[in-house]
Amino acid sequence: MAAAGQDIISLGTGEPDFPTPDHVCVAATAAMAAGQTRYTPTAGTEDLRLAIAADAGVKAQNVIISTGAKQVLSNLFLASLNSGDEVICPTPFWTSYRDIIKFSGGCLVEVACPSDQGFKITPQQLEAAITPATRWLLLNTPSNPSGAIYSLGELKVLAEVLRAHPDIWIASDEIYEHIAYTPFTSVRTAMPDLVDRIVVINGVSKAYSMTGWRIGWAIGPEPVIKAMSAVQGQSTSGTCSISQAAAVAALTGNQALITSRRAAFKSRRDRVVASINENPLLECILPEGAFYVFVSCEKALGQIAPGGSKIADDMTFCAYVLESVGLALIPGRAFSRKT
Ligand SMILES: Cc1ncc(COP(=O)(O)O)c(C=O)c1O
C-alpha cells in the first residue's frame, strides 16, 4: 500500500523515533579516526564490558557483548539448550522468542497470563508449568508487547518457587529497563541469592535510540558467558568496533536524554490508552513500561466492517484498520494471543 503511494503509519517495528544522541555519533566518528576499525575480542571490547560490569557490580568476565539483544538471546539458548529442554515463557511474549528457542532445539512452554493479572505469571502458574525438562524461565520486564513490569514483590514470590528448583535458570530480558513509568527492579536485584543462575539481557537499542548500531549484552555467571562466547566466536565474532565505542559513550555520557524521552513516551502512552478505551469495542490496560499498547479486540469480533467484511479474528481486525485508516498494527497472534 505504501509502495502504491498511500499514506501508511506503521507501528510494526519496535524502535524509538528519536535520533541517536549527538555525543554518541561523535564518539563513533572519533573511534574511526583513531583506527578502531579492526576485529574486537569475541566477547566485546574491554572498555564496553567494563562499563557494563561497573554499572551492574560484576566483573568484565560476567559480560558478553553481541550484535543486538536478539543475538544475545540466540547465543544464550544455542549455548544452553539440549533437544527437548523446556523454556517457560509467560504470554503474551515478544515475537522472536518462539523461533529463537525452536531453532536452538528447545521447547517453548507458554503460560497464558491474562490482562486481569497484568499479563504477568503468578507463582502458582510457574509451579504448575515446571517439569523435569524445564531449563529456563524467560521473563521480559518491562514487556514487549504488554508493557508489564514485575514489581519487586512479584519477583520475590517467583523467587520462592525457583529456590525450590535449583536446576532451573532465569533469563530476564530487560531491554526496556529505562523506559519504565513505575519502579523497575532488575531480576538480579530482586533475587540476589539466585544470581549464579540468572542471565540478564539488555542493550542500547531502545534507551539510547540505537537500534541500527546493534549492540546488546548479557550479564551472567562466567561459565554461561564463556559458552555464549564460544557460539559467537564461530558465528559472527566480536561485534562492530565502532558501535561498541559508541555504546561506551552512550553508557558513560550524559543520561538526561533518557529522562526527557521517557516523559515523552509517557505522555504519548496516556493519550493513546485514553483514546483506545473511549472506543466501546476496544480495551487495554495501562502499560507500565516500554512503548507498546496491547489492545484487546475481543469485543469487536463478529462485527461487520463498513466495507462488508466480517471481523473474525486478530488478523481480519488488523487488516480492517490498515485498509480503512492506513494504520499498520501487529496482530496479537505474533505475541501468542489471538484476540
Ligand atoms: C523484548 C525485546 N527483546 C529484544 C529485542 C531486540 O533488541 P535488539 O534490537 O538490541 O536486538 C527487542 C526488540 O524489539 C525486544 O522488544
Image (spheres, rainbow, N blue to C red):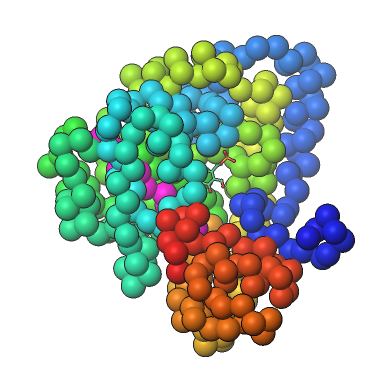
**Residue 21 seen from this side:** yes
What's drawn in magenta, residue-wise?
A: 135-145
Image spot of residue 164 (x, y percent): 12, 42
Q: Is residue 314 magenta?
A: no
Q: Looking at this view, name the residue that lies furthest to the left.
A: 164
Which residue is pictured at 65% across the width and 12% down the height? 39
Which residue is pictured at 45% across the width and 36% down the height? 100
Which residue is pictured at 80% across the width and 27% down the height? 29
Task: Assign the C terminus to one quadrant of the image.
Answer: bottom left
86 or 138, which is in the foreground? 86
171 or 335, which is in the foreground? 335
303 or 287, which is in the foreground? 303
Quadrant assignment for ligand 1:
top right
- Tell whether 101 sits left or right of 16: left
Residue 290 vs 65, above or below: the answer is below
Q: Looking at this view, name the residue that lies furthest to the right.
A: 5
Q: Looking at this view, name the residue that lies furthest to the front.
A: 308
Q: Is residue 144 magenta?
A: yes
Image spot of residue 172 (x, y percent): 39, 43
Image spot of residue 176 (x, y percent): 52, 50
Image spot of residue 72 (x, y percent): 49, 31
- Tell whether 145 sits left or right of 120: right
**Residue 287 seen from this side:** no
Which residue is pictured at 73% across the width and 44% down the height? 20
Residue 254, quarter of the rendered image? top right
- Tell whether 226 sits left or right of 178: left
Task: Assign the N terminus to one quadrant of the image.
Answer: bottom right
